Image (cartoon, coloured by chain):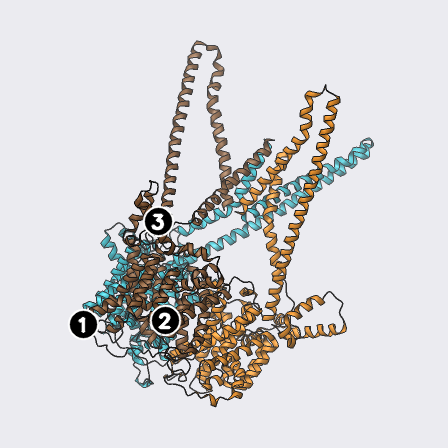
Chain colours: A orange, B cyan, C brown
Amino acid sequence: MPGSHCTKDIQRNISCSTSHPLTQKTHTTTFTLQEFQPLMANPVQQSEHEKSQGEKTDARTPAGPTNLQKTRACLLKGLSYFSGDMPVFGKWMEKQFLLLQLLDWVLRGAAQVMFVNNPLSGLIIFGGLILQNYWWALNGFVGTLFATISALILQQNRGAIAAGLYGYNGILVGLLMAVFSNAGDWYWWLLLPNIFMSMMCPIVSSALASINSRWDLPVFTLPFNILVCLHMVATGHYNHHFPQVLIQPRSELPNITWADIDVAKLFRSVPVGIGQVYGCDNPWTGGIFIIALFISSPITCIHAVLGSAVGMVSGLALAAPFESIYFGLWGYNCVLACIAIGGMFYALTWQVHLLAITCAFFCAYLGSAIANVMSTFGLPACTWPFCLSALTFLLITAETKKIFKLPLAKVTYPEKNLGFFWKLKKQEKMEKREKERKEKEEQQKAIEENLRLNEKEQLRLELERMEEGKTASDESKEQNEDTHTEDPGSEVGQQGTEEEDTNNNLIEVTVTDSV
Amino acid sequence: MPGSHCTKDIQRNISCSTSHPLTQKTHTTTFTLQEFQPLMANPVQQSEHEKSQGEKTDARTPAGPTNLQKTRACLLKGLSYFSGDMPVFGKWMEKQFLLLQLLDWVLRGAAQVMFVNNPLSGLIIFGGLILQNYWWALNGFVGTLFATISALILQQNRGAIAAGLYGYNGILVGLLMAVFSNAGDWYWWLLLPNIFMSMMCPIVSSALASINSRWDLPVFTLPFNILVCLHMVATGHYNHHFPQVLIQPRSELPNITWADIDVAKLFRSVPVGIGQVYGCDNPWTGGIFIIALFISSPITCIHAVLGSAVGMVSGLALAAPFESIYFGLWGYNCVLACIAIGGMFYALTWQVHLLAITCAFFCAYLGSAIANVMSTFGLPACTWPFCLSALTFLLITAETKKIFKLPLAKVTYPEKNLGFFWKLKKQEKMEKREKERKEKEEQQKAIEENLRLNEKEQLRLELERMEEGKTASDESKEQNEDTHTEDPGSEVGQQGTEEEDTNNNLIEVTVTDSV
Amino acid sequence: MPGSHCTKDIQRNISCSTSHPLTQKTHTTTFTLQEFQPLMANPVQQSEHEKSQGEKTDARTPAGPTNLQKTRACLLKGLSYFSGDMPVFGKWMEKQFLLLQLLDWVLRGAAQVMFVNNPLSGLIIFGGLILQNYWWALNGFVGTLFATISALILQQNRGAIAAGLYGYNGILVGLLMAVFSNAGDWYWWLLLPNIFMSMMCPIVSSALASINSRWDLPVFTLPFNILVCLHMVATGHYNHHFPQVLIQPRSELPNITWADIDVAKLFRSVPVGIGQVYGCDNPWTGGIFIIALFISSPITCIHAVLGSAVGMVSGLALAAPFESIYFGLWGYNCVLACIAIGGMFYALTWQVHLLAITCAFFCAYLGSAIANVMSTFGLPACTWPFCLSALTFLLITAETKKIFKLPLAKVTYPEKNLGFFWKLKKQEKMEKREKERKEKEEQQKAIEENLRLNEKEQLRLELERMEEGKTASDESKEQNEDTHTEDPGSEVGQQGTEEEDTNNNLIEVTVTDSV
C-alpha cells in the first residue's frame, strides 16, 4: 500500500517538524528547574572580586583538587549552611512540627524587610530590636506572627509564606505602630489594633500583588505603608484611645550653621540609617543589622551601607536640619532602594550598580518631598519614598542587555541572581556558537554537494561523449540514441523536482500548523 | 482507492480529535446563556436558611405538587414580578415609549447606588428622599436624568444604561452637591454645575471602566467621588457663586464622656447610617431605604443593616465623637462595603460572609482615616472608603474555592449569584463523576480485554498441545509444525503493533495541532 | 499513484485555506507602512474648509494641471519643507554631525510641549522665551539638553529621542524650576538640581510609559509634573539652598466686583494663557507661540486659542479672582487639553471637536480644584489638570465610529492624522464594496448555475420524452429503458455528493487548523 505508507510519512513529518519547539521548551524548563549551586565563596573577598572569582571557580573545577582547595571547598560548604537563604535548613524544617515551622517563617519574615530570606539573620535582627526596646520588639513579634497566621487562614501560597513574604509587613506594622504611639510603652491596648492591622497585611498584600503582577513587580513594603498610615491618620494625635505622636509641617527657616556640624555623628548616621529601616535610632542596633545582612549576602550589605551614605550626603545637599540627618531619617529609604536595585531585582553589573546609586539619590529627594507632604496630615514618611522610587526604577525599559531585570519568580539573593544571569548569558552564547557552527557545517555540506554534483555532471558528459563516439562507429542505432542519452538526465531531473515538491508540501503543512 | 480512503480517515481523525475542545466550549456557552429561574423563595426565612431551602426546592421538584406547594409556587411567581431585578417588567418596558423607558432607567439608577437593579425600589427610595428634603430630591432626580441622557449621547452600552448603571453616580452627584452647598435650598443656579457634573459622570465612568476592567472590577461610586470632590474643592467655602459648607480638620481632643452615651440614639444610628448613603440623616428615610432593599433582595438588606452596625461599633472603638456616630457618618461606607462583598460580587458562603464583616471593619477604619485627610482640603469623605476597601477585598486571590468571585458580566443580585454559583458547582461535580465513571469503565474494559486475551492464549496453548499430540501420531509433517504454531501469535502481534502505530500517529497529529 | 496525488492535494488545500489570513495580514501591513503625502494645503483656508479641500485635491489629481494649479503645487511643496513635522529636514539631519543632530532634537523637544514636532517652531519658541527672561530661557535650554543626553545614555528608543519626545519634559522642568525659585535670577547653584531633575526625566518617562502603554496612552507632561513638584516640596519655601516662592491656600472671600472688570485685559488673557504653558506671562511671548503653532499645524493653533478662551470663560463662571484670569492661570491647561483631544490623539470630526471643548471646560474645573489642593502643600498646579483630564477623555470607549482614537504609534499632527483616518475609512468602504460586489457576483453565478441546471434538466426531460417516443415505436427494448434514462441523473448526483464530501473534509481540516 504505497498510498497509506505515504500518508504515514506525512504524519511523521508533521509531528517531527512541529514537535521541535516543544522539545526546545522542555529543554529550557529543564534548565531553569535545575538547582544552582550556592555561589557564596569567601564572603570578605567576594563582594569586591566576585566576577573574577566566579570565573576562577568555574575554571578550577575540571582540575584536580589540592589540599588548599579541599579546605576551601569544606569552608564553602560550611558557609552555605547558614548563608544565602539557608536551603538545607529550609528543607529540614519542612518535616518539623508546625509551631517550629511558624517560628522559622516569623524569623525569615523579620529578615525579609531587608530582602533577606534567612532565619539566622532574622534571629540577629530580633536581637538588635531587643537591644533597642523590649516593648517594640514584642510588638514586632506579635505583628509578624499574626500576619503569617492570617496568610495561612486566607490560604495564600505556602511557598511564599515559608519564605517570610507575608511576615515582613507584619513586623513593620507592629514595630512602627509602637514607635509612633503617643501612649507610652507597655500600653497593652495597642496590641488590639496591632493584631487587626497585622492580619490585614496579607489581604492588602494579595490585592496589591494582583495589580503589580501585571508589570511583574513586587509589592515591597506598600502594605505596611498603607496600613500604618491608615491607623495613624484614622486615630491622629487628638484621640482618647490610640493617640499618635504629633508631627507638624515645617513653617520657619531651620537654623543651620555649618560650623556646628558634628563629623562623628555624621559618620554614625550611616549605621543609624540602617537601623531606622526598623525604626531604631540606636547605632549598635544598626551595626547588628549590618552583621545580619553580611551573613546572608555581602552584596546586600555593601549596598545597604552605600545607600545610607548617599542619603546622608543628600540631606546635607538639600540643607536638611542636622538633627534629622543624625537621626538616620535620610538614610533608611536609600538603604532599601539601593539594596533593591543593586543586585536584588536587577542582575548586578557596573551599569546596574550606578543605577542603584542614582536611585538612592532620587529616593533621598523623594523622601524629603514625601516627608513634607505627609507632615501636613501628621504622618511620617514611612517607606513610601523607597517603594515609589524602586518601583519607578524597576519599570524602566532600555534597549541594552546590561540592565537585566530578573523575572520575579527567579529573584532570590544578589549572589544567586548573578549566577542565574551568568548561566543565562553562557547558554545564550553557547546557542549562538552552536548556531554558527551549524551554519558553517551546512555551508560546508552545500559546497561538498556542489562538488559531487559537478563530478556527476562531468561523468555524465564523459558518458555522452563516449556514446557519441559509439554512434560515430555504429550509425544503424540512430533512432534510439537521443532518447537513451537524455534518459538518465531527465530521470534525475524528474526525481529531483518530485523530491522538491514533497519537501515544499511538507514545509507548507508545517507552516500552516504553526499558524 | 485504498489510499484516498486512508487520507479521508486521517482528516476525520484530525477533525475529531481537535473539534473536541470546540464542542466542549459550545457546551459551556450554552450553559451560561441559559436563563436561571428566580431563586427568590420566602424572603424572610431565606436569608437565614438559604442553603437548606435551595436544596429542598431542588429535591421537591420531581415530586407531585400538593395544595400547599401550589399556593407557594403562586406566591413565588407573584414575588418574582416585583422582587430581584424585575425581569418581566424590564422586558415589557423594552417595547414602550422612550420617555417611559427613561423613567424606568432613572428609577433603576436611583436604586443602583445600593446595587439594586429594581425600579420599584428606586421609586420607594425617591419617596424617602422627598420625605427628607424636596430640594435635594429634585437635584437627585435632575442628576440621574442628565447622567442617563449623557450616556445616551455618548452611545454607551444600551444594556448598561437600561440597568441604571450610568444613573447611580448622577443621583449621588446631584444629591450631595445640594447637601454640601452653603447657599441654602432652592438656590437655582446650583442646577448648572449639577447638570454639567452629572453629564460628566458617563465620561468618567467609561474612563475608569477602561482601567478597572483589566482586573474585572466594577467602578463602584468612584465617578461620583471624583466629581463631587472636584466641584467642592474647585469652588471651596470662600466662593461667591457656589460656596461649600466649611469642613475643617480636628485640632483638639474631642470631649467624650462615656456616661453621656445615649443608647437609643446609638440604635437609631443603624437606619440613619443606611440613609447617609444618600446623604440623608432622617431615620425614617433610612427605614424606607431598608424596605426598598428588602423588596429586591433580602440578603442585601441583611448585609446593609449588619454593615451599619459594624460601623457604629468601630466608631465607638476608635473613640469617635458621639455626634458623628449618631449622625450615621460611621455607617454608610460600611453598609455599601458589606453589601458589595457579602454576596454581590462574591458568591455568598460562610467564609465570604465573614470576609464581608472584616471588610466592613476595615472600611470603618479607612473611613476615619480618609475623613481626616480630606478635611485638610475642606472635603467630606464621600464614599471613597467604601470604594477603596471593596476594591481591595475584590482583588484578593486565595487558593480556596470557598471564596468565589463572580465574573463581572454575571453579577446580578445575591440570590441569583448564589444560584449561578451552585449550578457551576453542581456541573463541576457532575463532570468529575462522569470522568470517574469513564475511568472506571476503561479499567473494566482493560480487565475484560486481559481476560479475553488470556482465554485466547489458553486456547492457543491447548491447540498447540493438541497439535503436539498430532505430531506424536503423525511424524512425517514435522518440518511444517514450528512455523504453523507460531503463525497465529505472530500475526496477532503484528496487528497489535500496527494498530498501536496508527494510534500513535493520530495522537501525534492531535498534539501538534493543539500546539 | 492516485493515493499520493490525493495526499498532495490535501496538503495544497490545507496550505491554501490557512495561508489566506496570512496574505490578508501582509496586505494591511503593506498599507500601514506606506507613506502618506503631506496634507498641508494652504494653511489659512484649510483650518476652516479642510474636509472639502482634501477631497478637492484628491479629485483634481487625475485632471491636467493649469497654471494656477502649478503655482499652487509649488507653494504646497514649499510649505511642506517647514510645516508639519519637517520630514525632509529630519531625513537630511540624520546624516549630519551628532552635535547638530542634538540641536535639532533640543529644538523639537522645546516644541513638543505643544505636541509640535518641528525644529522651526522650537526655534521661535526659544525666541519667545528669550523675550520673556534670559535666565529662564537658559534654564530651559539646559533642561532640554540634559534630558536628551540622559535618554541617550539610558539607550532609549532613538526615533523617540529624534522626535524630541525625551526633551519636552526637560524644558518644562528647567523653566519652571527657575520660575518658581525664590532665590532670584542668575542663582547659578540652581543649575545643579536642574541638571539632576532633567536627567531623571527619561527614567520617569520610561517608567510611566511602561504603565500607560497598557492602555495605549501617552505620558504627556506627567514626568515634568512629578519632578517639579518633587523638587519644590522637597525643598519648600523655608530652605537655605533652594527656597521656593510662597504659595498658600485661600482663606478668605476674594474681593470680586463685576464693575471693575477690564475687558482689554480679559482678551489679552488668551495669548497670555498660551504663554503660560511655558510659564511666561508676557502677551507678546504668547503671540510668538501662536505663530510657532500656526507654522506647524493650523488645527493645533485654532484649538490652542479656543482652549485658552474656554479657560478664561470658566474662570469667570467659577468666580475666580480677576488677577489670576488676567495672568493666564486658567488658560494654559485648557490650551493643552484642547489641542490633545482636538485632532491630536483623536481624528478630528465635529463630534471630537465638541468633545475637545467639553474637555477644556472639564480641565478648567479640574485646574481650579488641583490648584486649591496643591496650595495646601505650597505647590502650583503645574499641568496636572491637563494630564488628568486628557487621560480621562482618551480612556473613553463609545460604540460610535465618529470618535476614532488613533493608535499611539500613528499619532503625528492633526492634519496628517486626519489623512490617516480618511484613508482608513476609504479602505473600509472599498473593502465593503468589494465584499458586496463579490456577494452579488456569487448570487449572479448561483442564478446562472440554476438556469443552466434547469436547461440541462429540460434537455434531459426532452431526451426522456424522445426516448419514450422511441419506445412507442420500438417496444422490444423496454427492459433497458429505466436504467438508461436514470443513469445521467444518478451519476450527476453521485458526483455532487462526492464533491460535497471532499469539500466538507477540507473545511474540517481548515477549521481544526485555525483552532
Q: Residues within 10 Å of mark 1 (few under 14, many from 20)?
A: few
- Horizontal relation, residue C474 to residue A88: left or right: left
Can you give x and y, in whole percent of width and height, for residue B253 in the image?
Answer: 34, 85
Q: Nearer the viewer, residue A383 or B465?
A: A383
C-alpha separation, residue under disc 2 versus residue under disc 1: 41 Å
Q: Quadrant of the N terminus of chain C?
A: top right
Q: Residue furthest bottom?
A: A260
Q: Nearer the viewer, residue B298 or C53?
A: C53
The image quarter containing residue A348 is bottom right
C-alpha separation, residue under disc 3 versus residue under disc 1: 53 Å
Chain that bears disc 1: C
Q: Residue furthest left?
A: C259
Q: What's the residue type where badge 3 is placed?
A: Cys
Mark nearer the viewer, 3 or 2: 3
- Horizontal relation, residue A246 to residue A73: left or right: left
Q: Residues within 10 Å of mark 3 (few under 14, many from 20)?
A: few
Query: Mark 3–mark 2 contact, CB under 8 Å?
Result: no
Q: Is circle 2 on the same chain as circle 1?
A: no
Q: Is circle 3 on the same chain as circle 2?
A: no
Can you give x and y, in whole percent of width and height, for residue C149 in the image?
Answer: 48, 67
Q: What's the residue type where badge 2 is placed?
A: Pro
Query: Which comes sooner in the sequence, label 3 or label 1?
Result: 3
Q: Is residue A330 above or below residue C76?
A: below
Residue receiving disc 2: B385
Chain that bears disc 3: C
- SS of the residue at dot 2? helix
Tell me what residue is drawn at x 43 percent, y 73 percent: C194
Residue receiving disc 1: C258
Q: What's the residue type where badge 1 is placed?
A: Trp
